[in-house]
Amino acid sequence: MKKLYISDLDGTLLNDNAAFSEYTKEKLNYFYEKGVTVSLATARSIMSARPIIGGVKLGAPVVLMNGVFVYDLEKDRAVKYFELPAEAMAQALDSFYKRGLNPFLYLYGDDGSLSMRYSGFDSEGMRRFYETRKVMLGGRFTYSADFTRPEKGQHPVYVNYYAPYEIVSPVAREIEKIKGVSFVFYKDSYSEDWLIEIYSEEASKAKGVEYVKKYCKADSVTVFGDNLNDILMFENADRAVAVENAVPKVKEKADEIIGSNNSDSVVKFIESDFLKG
């Protein structure tokens, strides 16, 4: 029986410093050598995930940006991705613009590159996000006054925005009514800001996990998580495990609760489960 283990990153597999502990890193590489199939399902994009997971070998494609991408790290290219429908994207963007808010838009190119567009910074969270990622993108983070007309060969895949709850929550209520898109709305793991992330209704962590399960020809999948964007993944997995620091709603959906993200709890669980056979 082939088992697949898929973990969220922030607040779950990563510690509070947004990094792997040396112990966790060593165990992940050990699992790879022993043929234990481990993967990731994260809201992060490849450019923010790559610096963290560099030096770690995984036995399966990873799920990125809440399921927008299933990504082959070795080939450095998407195995599968979901584009935002044009009309639904325009409606979603209008939910921000009419409130004077300026979200980010991610585009996936025919050449396999990921780029971002911005039209201004109206929250500290958005400016902080830009500052931490502009170097990663190497010039592919550019200003645009009109997101609805992407260049040829550029496919809109993701919209996000960071700000205090009272600013973002009215947008979330409106996005919920738009056909053709899915979204997650949850508190950031590292600040008091709340995040809204919008993408095709065809994409989700749950669907990404299911794709990886089939890709690896696994008989079962165990998932690990901590935040609201992990709930659908929990509901559709064979086994769902929450870390001790998970939000209450995630713990309610879990089959088991383990130690915190600062205690190497995920890799300890995988090793114990693996040794059981």
Image: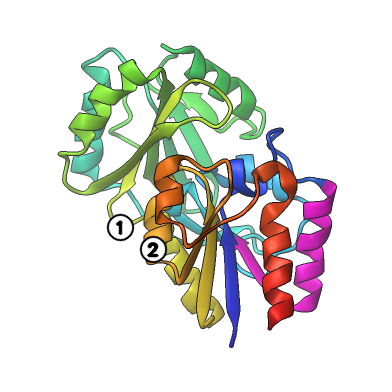
Which residues make up the magenta segment?
Answer: 22-39
On the image, the x and y values in percent for residue 167 come to: 32, 16
Q: Which is more N-terminal, label 2 or label 1?
A: 1
Other residues around mark 2 within 10 Å, as few (<14) / some (14–19) / many (≥20): some
Per the model, the C-alpha gap separating discs 1 and 2 is 8 Å
On the image, the x and y values in percent for residue 237 come to: 44, 67
Q: Residue at x 77, y 57 (%)?
A: 56
Name above or below for residue 143 compared with residue 271.
above
Badge 1 marks a residue whose secondary structure is loop
**Viewer-nearest of labels 1 and 2?**
2
Name above or below for residue 259 compared with residue 172.
below
Outermost residue, bottom side: 1
Residue 207, numbered label: 2
Examine the structure image and report whether residue 131 is included in the region drawn in magenta.
no
On the image, the x and y values in percent for residue 271 come to: 73, 68
Q: Residue at x 34, y 51 (%)?
A: 83
Residue 202, numbered label: 1
Residue 133, numbered label: none
Q: Residue at x 54, y 43 (%)?
A: 44
Q: Residue at x 79, y 77 (%)?
A: 34
Q: Observer-nearest residue: 118 or 276?
A: 276
Q: Observer-nearest residue: 80 or 55?
A: 55
Horizontal arrangement in the rendering, residue 28 relative to residue 50 (left or right): right
Query: In the rendered image, is residue 36 in sight?
Result: no
On the image, the x and y values in percent for residue 204 come to: 38, 55
Task: Describe the colour scheme in one phrase.
Answer: rainbow
Magenta span: chief secondary structure? helix
Q: How many callouts does the rendering have?
A: 2
1 and 2 marks in contact (CB < 8 Å): yes
Give, as a three-letter code, the residue at label 1.
Answer: Glu
